[in-house]
Each structure stands twice: as C-alpha cells, then as structure tokens.
Amino acid sequence: MQSRVAIEKQFRLIRTALFVAWAILSAIIVAWSVRSSTERAYSDVMQKAGETLAVQTEILSGVLDKYRLLPPLLSRQSSIRTLFVRDAAGNAQTIDARGTAEAIAGMSAARDVAFFFPDGALLANARGSSAKSAVAPPELIEVARQGRLGRAALSYGGDDRTYAFSFGVRRDGKFVGVVVVYVDFYRVEAAWALSARRIFVTDKSGTVFLANDPAWRLKPLSDFRQAGEPARYLIGDGFEQRLDLTQRLPLLEWDLHVLADPAPVATARLSAASIATLACLLAGLIALLALRRNEMAILRARTDRATALRLERVVRDRTRALSVINRSLSHEVEVRRTAEERLRKTQDELVQTAKLAALGQMSAALSHEYNQPLAAIRSYADNALRFIDRGATSEVSANLSRINGLVERMAELSRTLLSFSRKPGATIEPVPLGTIVDEALLLARPRARAAGIANIHVGQQVSGLYVQGGRIRLGQVIVNLVNNAIDALAGIPNARVEIDARREGDLIIVTVADNGPGISPEELPKVFDPFFTTKGIGEGIGIGLSIVDNIVRDFGGTIVASNRPEGGACFTVSLRAASAPGDAPDNIEETAGIGLGV
Ligand code: ADP
C-alpha cells in the first residue's frame, strides 16, 4: 500500500502541473476573449459610425447635386439668356433679372442666385446688391467662360460660408454672362447637430468647412487633432481618443468625417478580460477543489484500508490467542472431566460404603430387635417344656402367651420394615387436615394412655384447613410425630402434646410440639437421617422421621425440627394449602401402614 507521504507528494506534483496548465490555458482564454470582444465592439462602433457617415454623405451629396445642376439648366433658358441683353440705351435689364433671380432662389431655397456679366459686374441677384454674394470670385467667371461648371467654397468671415456653382450663358455662341447659385449649409449642419458624434467636412487644404461644432468651422483640422493611434480630438475642454471614419466627396474634393467614440471598445475589452479571468479563476478553483477532494478520498480510503488491516491483524492475533485459550480450556475441561469421573467414582464408592455401613447398622439393629425376642421366645419355650413335664399347665399357658406377645412384636417390626420399603401412593390432592389428625389420634391415643399421657391438644384452626397431600400418608406423618412425642415424654410430669396449624400465604404450617426434653443441638441435624435413633435397643430403629421427611417432600412440602424456647421439641411441617373441594371423595390410597410408629 502506498504511504500517505507518497500520496501527498504525488498530488503536490499533479497540483503543480495542473497549475501550470491552468495558467497557460487561462492566459490563452483571456487573450482570446479580450481580442474577440474588442474586435466585436470595434466593428460595432465602426458599423454604427459608418452608418452615420453613409447617411450624412448621402444628405450632403443630395444637397450639392441639387444645386450643381441648377446653373447649367438656367443658362439654357432663353428667358435667362435675354436678361443679359442691354437695351438700346445700353442699360442692363436689372429689374427683370432681379425678379427672375428672386423667383429662382425662392423656388430652389438657394442662399442666393446671381447673374454676372463676363467682366464680373453684377447684373442682379436675389438677395440684393449689398449681399456678400453680390460679388463673384473671378475664378467662377473664368471657369464659366471656358464652358465648364464653376465651383467654389466661399467664406465671408465668421461663421458665414457658402458654396457656389457657376455656369456661362451664351447667346449665339457668344459668352454673355454667368449664372451663379449659392448653396446654404445651414440645414445640413442643423441636422448634424442632432448627432452625438462629431461630424465635419474638410476641404483639400485640411480646413474644416462644415462641422456640427461651430467652434471648428473654418479652422484647420490640425487645431483640434493630436496625432496618435487612434488620434485624439478636442472634445469639450480636452482631447479624447476618437476613431475617424472618412468619406471622400469627389465632386467637391471634400472629406466628410464622422468621429466615433472608442470607449465601448475599451469597456468591452475590460469586461471581457474580467469575465474571462473570473471564469478561469473559478474553473481553477473548482479543479483545485475536485483534486483536493480526490486526494482526501484516496487518503481516507488508504486510512480505512490501514484500519481494516490493523483490525484484521488484531482479530487474527485475538483468534490465535483465543484458540490457545481454547486449547488450554479443552485441556482443563479434560482434566476436570477426569477429576469429576474420579470424584463420581469416589462418591459411588462412598455411597457404596455408606450403603454397606447402613446395611451393617440396619443388620445390627434388626439382629438386636429380632435376637432379643427370639432369645426370650427360646427361654419361654424351654421353660414351657419344663412346665409341661412338671404338669404346671397354667405356667405353660403364661409362657405361651408371652411367646405370642413377642411374635406379635416381631410381626409389627416386620410390617414397619415393609412399609419403609413399599412404594408410596402417588396421588396428591386436597385433603382435610382436621379429619386426618383425628384419625391419627385414634391410633395414637391408646399408646399415649399406656404411657400415662392424657393431654393431647389439637388447635381449633386445624379442622377447617385443607392441604395438598395423600390422606393415609399424611396420617402416617402425624402418627409418627405424635408417637415420637409420646416416647420423648416418658416419665415427664404434666406431659403434653400440642398439634396446631395455621395458614401462611399459600402454605399450611402444621406443628407437633411437646414439653419433653427436646433434641440436643448436635442431634438436631441428624434426626431425619435413616437409622438415626437415640432410643435403646428394641425401642426404635431410627427410620420414622426419615419416612416422614420423604412423605412431606413427596407432597412438595418441608419439615423442620426445632426446640421450643420453653422446652420440648417442635416439628414444623409446611404443606401447600388447598381449597376445600365441594364433594371431596374419601381417598383410599393405601390399605395399610398408618399407625406404625416405631
Ligand atoms: P426412632 O423413634 O426409632 O428412634 P425416629 O426417626 O422416629 O426413630 O426418631 C429419631 C430420633 O429423633 C429419636 O431417636 C429421638 O432421639 C429423636 N426424636 C424424635 N422425636 C423426638 C421428640 N419429640 N423429642 C425428642 N427427641 C425426638
């Protein structure tokens, strides 16, 4: 991947190259646009001035042509010719001639019309002999004498100028006089005055003869012009550049000038230069921005790629580390599995050992339980035999009934063991606690009475409560707890057993308490263990509470043993509360097993 510095350097080079190209291109564009708009503006100015020039040339030529033809025409008129004939007295026909001149001047709008004799003497003129035009310049007479059209530009000082055309009058081939028509330029100049451009006429000597600026008239053009390209002319108070468009009037050897203001050309040049420069600058700026953007995009892409690569590396490293960890974890799992396996084996061995120990314990207990009555039965039987030999039947009978009692006790023990091993009923349903306690007490009371305990108290609340359980099994629980209490109360004065129950939320708490010696703290955790007993041989084998605990668990409840503060043990059974069923059928789930306290 290209480094950031290399990319920046590359773009710096591109920028420099682009700048050079831009500068050259901009110079060309600016020059080209300046040139083309200058040309356009120039030709525009020239075209407009040219139009003015053409029009004014036409007007001036029209005016001059009109008056140019007048003297030859008049000289051919016989009425004109006769004017130059003197009467008999040798007097000229001044009055007639004057009238004719006035009429012609009036009709043609000429400045003056005059008739001269060949010697230059005035016959008559339209404006009167005092007029400046009453004197004909000799060259006009001379050219007329030669039979050609005489022409002359005349100035009388000040602003007074005229142009005169002359033609000779011949009578019978004899040169008798001259007709001179004077042209007035007042109207032409008045028309020029309307134009914003300077319009003027110069004669062949370079003198301004006609001009729309009165100050210029009859003065040499050089007074108003400074040489230059374009030349500068006096406009107002100062000299300004003007383009001079000239049209020659060949007849008069005059030049008609129209001065055009070149300012629009300069303005067009300036605006073209500014617009082209601005456009180039803008284009350059856009190109620069685009390039910068491109550079940024490439740099960003590079950074992104670098980040992605870095990330990829990190991920690869992590993955590697994770697979190492994974491997070590697998190893650990394997070690743990082996350890667990070993533990399970050890546990199994322990359970096996415990089972064997329990079996041994149970065997010892059972062998004591059975050996003792068996030994008694043997001695009672031996005695009975001896009593038979002696014929003492009453003793034989007493011994046999003792043997019977001992066999009955062994059978009871056997039934207890059977109930321990039998699979309990599985049905769990709402059962009436009060009824079950009553039934259990029916079985327990004879034993209580035998032990001298008359006081078994049942709380009032017990009768109304229903719990989730099995009727026979719950009875077994109560009988076992009461029997244990009875056992514990042996020899205790004012012995008392209390059975009570209360509702706590969704639970029914049943307590069986006594005012016996209670359970020592070190024995408390063990009382529910199978075959734990503190009773002497033949009095208990330690499976009652274990059975009770199993039954209560089956019901989804718990049982806790504790000592009451005032003395005595208390067994607290928590069972799930049930609502009284409307037609609860009596559930006979088991046919035997109740009342088997040991
Ligand atoms: P067993 O009655 O055959 O000994 P149990 O499992 O019923 O077996 O009881 C285990 C032991 O719990 C008894 O040996 C006794 O030490 C103790 N125990 C049970 N109930 C009471 C009680 N109400 N008061 C004092 N100790 C009790």
Image: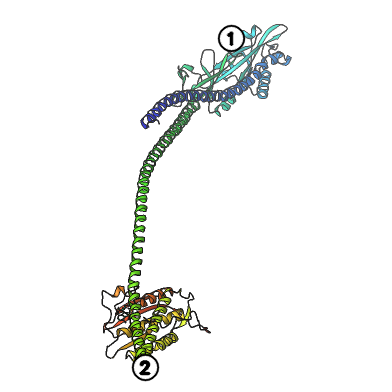
Does 589 sit above or below residue 36?
below
Q: Which mark is residue 394?
A: 2
* Extreme-front residue of the structure: 389
Q: Is residue 348 visible?
A: yes
Neighbourhood count class around disc 2 (C-alpha, 10 Å): few under 14, some 14–19, many 20 upward: few
Judged left or right of residue 274, residue 52 is: right
What residue is rendered at 36% in x and 52% in y? 338
As shown in the figure, which amino acid type bears the numbered disc 1? Answer: Glu
**Residue 178 position within the rendered picture, expressed as x and y whole percent measured from the top left:** 65, 12
Quadrant of ligand 1: it is bottom left
The image quadrant that residue 54 belongs to is: top right
Element marked by disc 2: helix
Of labels 2 and 1, earlier in sequence is 1
Q: Secondary structure at mark 1?
A: helix
Which residue in the structure is indicated by mark 1?
A: 139
- Nearer to us of marks 2 and 1 is 2
Q: Nearer the viewer, residue 129 or 46?
A: 46
Q: Note whether 268 is above or below 443 in the view shown.
A: above
Q: Depth check: give the residue in front, 380 or 300.
A: 380
* Camera-side residue of 535 and 425: 535
x then y, percent, for residue 572: 35, 79
Q: Is mark 2 within 8 Å of ligand 1?
A: no
Asked if residue 543 lies left or right of residue 154, the reply is left
Residue sitting at x 51%, y 84%: 586
Q: Amino acid at mark 2?
A: Ser
Residue 14 versus residue 453 in the image, above or below: above
**Residue 44: where, in percent of width, then height?**
55, 25
Q: Quadrant of the N terminus?
A: top left
Answer yes or no: is residue 457 visible: no
**Where in the figure is residue 378, as x and y percent of width and height?**
35, 82
